[in-house]
Image (cartoon, helix red, strand yellow):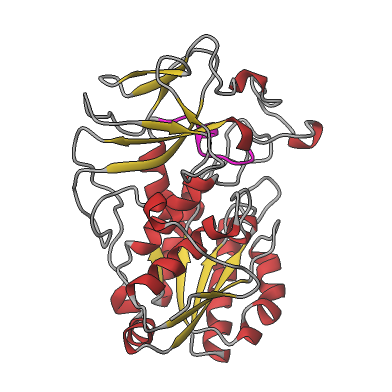
């Protein structure tokens, strides 16, 4: 059966989206084929990859997350050099790879993005394919199938299932380079491939700039009227900003959303946390860990499924610069960042 996304055509190249070889259904340790890991390169300074590559395995460095005719494939020695033992990559003199020092926000601290027209990192990324030298315990995500029995039954039974993705600009697809790469589109596509007799319908109910306050206001129009079977809820980025929503109110708002969805529909619910924004951005409170923990508490309290995006993002980001993963250099994931979200959802085990 076809995978439908209202208003969007989805034809994801699955091979380009597989980072970890094998089935991502829970905590595991396995060798990894890394696909499309993103970096920005500063001058000729080395940038760290998330994992150290094998000593001799193949590596491709290109200008887009997915390989294809519109992607520039860079050449080792001409454009970049790799230190496999250290797990680093750097530009070389005369490289065709953009120098991140030319980014309008490079070197800025406590910056106000409104004062820097044209900000963003999309034109500066390289995306790297390689084989990790050691097994990697990632993603770390507990199975959530016991909390999603109706969804699993519908998928296995071959019936239609409507997914509504609800949240802020991240969920709306901020800085994904095409709709197919928005994380919930990737996940819906993987479900359609796994259950070919089902009819998976995925809809965008998110609005850029929203916190849970606006989420409550828009809930009737964006979610309840759509008669969903499954609702993905992801807030926190705007709630956590300076002047945003206190933790206690954030939790209460999420609980109210859940209560209203359950009262008006038969939908099951997945809550997912989010990642910390660029710490150099002046509007962040640097408290995202608290909002992620609050999201998990609400999921446990209400019996909803939970996807630990925050924890899995941080596991990848440990060796990397914030800018390596941020499409807008502030608070939107790039294509690889959307992939982190998608893999976390996949690891719930549906």
Residue furthest to the front: 69
Q: Residue at image x 61%, y 44%?
A: 331
Give how far across and how far down residue 139 sits, in percent.
31, 52
Residue 335 located within the stretch drawn in magenta: no
Rendered-image quadrant of the N terminus = bottom left
Tell me: residue 194, above or below residue 264. above
Q: Which quadrant holds residue 347? A: bottom left
Tell me: residue 281, above or below residue 15. above
User: Can residue 137 be seen in the rendering of this structure?
Assistant: yes
State the residue in front, 74 or 42.
74
Give the number of marks. 0
Q: Residue at image x 62%, y 84%?
A: 226
Give how far across and how far down residue 335 sits, in percent.
52, 47
Tell me: residue 301, above or below residue 235. below
State the residue in front, 42 or 209.
42
Q: Which quadrant holds residue 94? A: top right
Q: Which quadrant holds residue 194? A: bottom left
Report the span colored magenta: 320-329
Give how far across and how far down residue 254 sits, in percent.
55, 70
Residue 325 located within the stretch drawn in magenta: yes
Q: Is residue 269 left or right of residue 101?
A: left
Give how far across and how far down residue 96 sits, in percent.
56, 21
Rendered-image quadrant of the C terminus = bottom left
Q: Residue at image x 44%, y 67%?
A: 189
């Amino acid at each position: 059966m076809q995978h439908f996304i209202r208003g969007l055509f989805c034809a994801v190249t699955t091979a380009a989206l597989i980072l970890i070889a094998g089935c991502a259904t829970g905590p595991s340790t396995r060798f990894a084929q890394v696909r499309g890991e993103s970096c920005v390169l500063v001058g000729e300074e080395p940038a760290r990859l998330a994992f150290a590559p094998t000593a001799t395995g193949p590596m491709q460095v290109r200008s887009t997350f997915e390989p294809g005719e519109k992607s520039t494939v860079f050449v080792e020695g001409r454009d970049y050099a790799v230190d496999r033992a250290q797990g680093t990559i750097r530009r070389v003199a005369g490289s065709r790879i953009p120098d991140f020092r030319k980014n309008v926000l490079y070197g800025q601290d406590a910056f106000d993005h409104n004062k820097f027209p044209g900000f963003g990192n999309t034109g500066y990324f390289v995306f790297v394919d390689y084989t990790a030298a050691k097994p990697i315990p990632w993603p770390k995500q507990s199975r959530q199938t016991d909390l999603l029995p109706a969804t699993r039954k519908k998928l296995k039974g071959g019936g239609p299932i409507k997914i509504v993705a609800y949240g802020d600009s991240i969920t709306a697809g901020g800085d994904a380079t095409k709709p197919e790469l928005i994380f919930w589109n990737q996940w819906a596509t993987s479900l359609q491939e796994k259950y070919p007799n089902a009819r998976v319908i995925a809809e965008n109910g998110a609005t850029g700039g929203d916190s849970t306050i606006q989420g409550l206001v828009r809930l009737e129009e964006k979610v309840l009227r759509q008669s969903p079977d499954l609702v993905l809820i992801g807030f926190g980025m705007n709630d956590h900003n300076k002047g945003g929503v206190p933790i206690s109110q954030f939790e209460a708002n999420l609980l109210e959303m859940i209560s209203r969805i359950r009262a008006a529909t038969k939908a099951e619910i997945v809550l997912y946390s989010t990642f910390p924004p660029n710490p150099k951005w002046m509007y962040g409170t640097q408290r995202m860990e608290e909002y992620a923990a609050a999201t998990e508490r609400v999921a446990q309290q209400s019996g909803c499924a939970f996807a630990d995006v925050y924890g899995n993002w941080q596991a990848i980001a440990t060796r990397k610069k914030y800018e390596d993963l941020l499409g807008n250099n502030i608070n939107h994931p790039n294509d690889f960042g959307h992939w982190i979200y998608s893999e976390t959802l996949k690891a719930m085990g549906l």
